[in-house]
């Protein structure tokens, strides 16, 4: 049986190290919160090769194109999978993606947030397959995000014991 980790490798993708909080920043919450067969995924940015927050930073529709932001959303998805794997040990424990919610720091009048989030949605389906990867999703534009981030993505999954 092909695992999500096998699919990542076949796609030529590597997970970054699990994300670390920036020095001096207090985060009184968990990046991944596992409760009774569910895992709630806090809003994530991208993670760099050292485990530090790497962005993306800026305003979509002003500092980066929709295509660039879509690629960045895929990178944020890899950050999420890294933290998720660190928390539960094996991505094969995922029995279903429930929902994905993305916030995109958007220029005035920008309306392609839904296209940006396709980067994350496509990654989930590529890695978990259409049955397990099927999810509900919302994408909204916001006037600003913490640390000047261009996007923040969260989600919810079902997991086996």
Image (cartoon, helix red, strand yellow):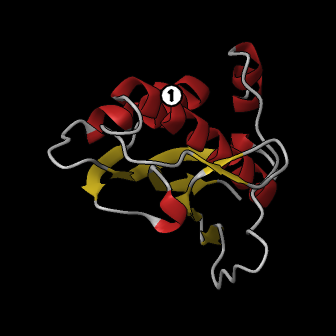
- Name the residue located 26 percent from the left edge and 53 percent from the top edge: 141
Rendered position, 127 above or below 10: below
The quadrant in which residue 19 appears is: bottom right
Which residue position holds label 1? 71
Which residue is at the front of the view, 81 or 111?
111
- Name the residue located 57 percent from the left edge and 41 percent from the top edge: 77
Rendered position, 26 above or below 93: below
Q: Is residue 60 left or right of residue 27?
A: left
Q: Is residue 74 left or right of residue 150?
A: right
In percent of width and height, residue 33 lies at: 63, 71
In percent of width and height, residue 131 lies at: 46, 31
Instruction: Identify the image quadrant of the N terminus.
Output: top right
- Name the residue located 26 percent from the left edge and 47 percent from the top edge: 107
Which residue is at the front of the view, 36 or 97?
97
Which residue is at the front of the view, 44 or 92?
44
In percent of width and height, residue 102 lies at: 39, 51
In percent of width and height, residue 136 lies at: 33, 46
Rendered position, 68 above or below 97: above
Q: Is residue 138 left or right of residue 53?
A: left
Q: Is residue 131 visible?
A: no
Instruction: Identify the image quadrant of the C terminus.
Output: bottom right
As drawn, which residue projects farthest toward the front? 63
Q: How many marks?
A: 1
SS at circle 1 = helix
Q: Is residue 111 visible?
A: yes
- Name the residue located 82 percent from the left edge and 41 percent from the top edge: 49
Instruction: Determine crowd level at label 1: few under 14, some 14-19, many 20+ residues with C-alpha closer than 10 A.
Output: some
């Amino acid at each position: 049986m092909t695992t999500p980790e096998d699919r990542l490798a076949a796609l030529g993708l590597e997970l970054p190290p699990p994300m670390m909080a920036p020095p001096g920043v207090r985060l009184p919450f968990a990046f991944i919160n596992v409760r009774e067969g569910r895992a709630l995924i806090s809003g994530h940015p991208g993670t760099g090769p050292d485990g530090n927050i790497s962005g993306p930073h800026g305003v979509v529709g002003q500092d980066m194109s929709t295509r660039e932001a879509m690629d960045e959303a895929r990178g944020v998805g890899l950050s999420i999978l890294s933290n998720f794997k660190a928390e539960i040990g094996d991505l094969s424990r995922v029995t279903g993606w429930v929902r994905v919610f993305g916030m995109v720091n958007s220029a005035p009048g920008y309306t392609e947030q839904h296209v940006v989030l396709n980067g994350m949605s496509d990654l989930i389906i590529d890695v978990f397959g259409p049955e397990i990867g099927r999810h509900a999703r919302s994408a909204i534009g916001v006037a600003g995000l913490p640390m000047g981030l261009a996007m923040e993505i969260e989600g919810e999954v079902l997991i086996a014991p």
